[in-house]
Image: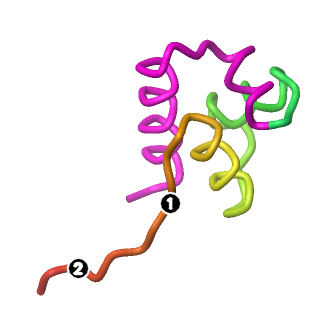
Amino acid sequence: MTANSMISDLRHLARSSGHNLTTWAAAAGMKRQQLSEYVNGNVMPTLETFTRLADAVGYDLELKKRNP
């Protein structure tokens, strides 16, 4: 999974939770413009930022062992 696909998945979850960029950004404790940079692929979020974005829409990030 790439960072861009993770952001895309999170954006879908945010929309499904009733968020737009403004409310999602506020819930994640950042400015809308900053979130827009991540969503548009202009800036790569850190792991900490991914965690904040997921938490803001009620999800956790976790690592899972792949099946061989």
Q: Main secondary structure of the magenta part?
A: helix
Residue beneath the point at 63% across and 28% down: 40
Secondary element under disc 2, as helix, strand or loop, is: loop
Decide whether residue 19 is among the magenta residues.
Answer: yes
- Crowding around mark 2 (Cα neighbors within 10 Å: few <14, some 14 to 19, many 20+) is few
Residue beneath the point at 50% across and 60% down: 61
Left or right, 53 with respect to 33, comes to: left
- The single residue placed furthest to the left in the displayed view is 68
Assign the N terminus to one quadrant of the image. bottom left
Q: Which residue is mark 1?
A: 61
Please name the amino acid that badge 1 sits on: Leu
Disc 2 versus disc 1: distance between alpha carbons? 15 Å
Per the rendered image, the range of residues in magenta is 1-28
Seen in the picture, residue 28 relative to 62 is either above or below; the reply is above
Q: Which residue is mark 2?
A: 66
Residue beneath the point at 74% across and 43% down: 43
